[in-house]
Image (cartoon, rainbow, N blue to C red):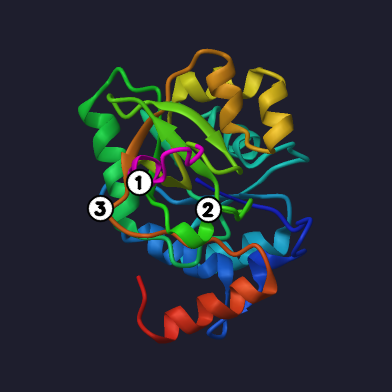
Amino acid sequence: MIPARWASTRFPGKALAAIAGEPMIAHVVRRACTARSVGAVIVATDDRRIAVAAAAAGAEAVMTGECRSGTDRVAEAVLGREDWEVVVNVQGDEPLVAAENVDALVETMLAAPEVELATLCRPLEEDLLEDPNAVKVVRDRSRRALYFSRAPIPYPRQRDVAARLWRLHLGMYGFRRDALRRFVAWPPSDLELAEGLEQLRALEHGMSILVVDAPRPGFGVDTPDDLRRAERLLEQGAG
């Protein structure tokens, strides 16, 4: 499931922003379609222009109403269907999304039926430590999330130890159907509102989140500068 809306606080219309001559959503769809574990690729959107571009790239397009988050948009599009065990939420602003990351997430969940919700991480480069757009995660010895934050976590009181633990969260999620249904039924939580991170809603309600090491880096487009960087990476054959 790829949620994509027209409105964006920092970059309105970015789902249709051109990268290498094609709308960004088309790049996301085509890369998601190459994941070997995926049975269907669906774009959930509130904008018919995005739906047309998604369908042209090979996705099924589902129109949704006003939704408070991407996860709510995914839920609106998928919860009426009963034929999927695992639903993967792929961000619509990741034109370099790696099929290997999708497969790693799905295969982990299929191998561990007790996992309700899973996501991805990578080692964090130190120059992103203070960047609030780079979401950090700390996890326990079983790879379950302890906390997500836009702030540096863990705090580097002992820097060499902290540096070994720094992880960048990649915003791709795998949900089991019942976990997705429960998640969207809860109102936004205080931690979620404080940090602007909806995965904290799951933690506040006691849902465990397995955080898997991603095989490939992720790269999201939040600004026009990010868009230009994505285009350069595509030209260089990234992903």
Q: Where's residue 100, x and y in %? A: 28, 55
Is residue 183 something that shows in the picture?
yes
Compare marks 1 and 3 and give the one earlier in the sequence: 3
Does residue 206 belong to the magenta stretch?
Answer: no
In this rendering, the count of numbered labels is 3
Is residue 84 something that shows in the picture?
no
Residue that extends furthest to the left in the rendered view of this protein:
111
In which quadrant is the C terminus drawn? bottom left
Identify residue type, mark 3: Arg
Badge 3 density bin: few <14, some 14–19, many ≥20, Cα 10 Å: few
Does residue 157 belong to the magenta stretch?
Answer: yes
Q: Which residues are magenta?
A: 155-164
The residue identified by callout 2 is 129
Badge 1 density bin: few <14, some 14–19, many ≥20, Cα 10 Å: few
The residue identified by callout 1 is 160
The mark lying in front, picked from 2 and 1, is 1
Identify residue type, mark 2: Leu
Residue sitting nearer the eye, 32 or 11: 11
Q: Quadrant of residue 151?
A: top right
Location of residue 28 with respect to 165 vertically, above or below: below
Identify residue type, mark 1: Asp
The residue identified by callout 3 is 36
* Side of 46 relative to 137 (left or right): right
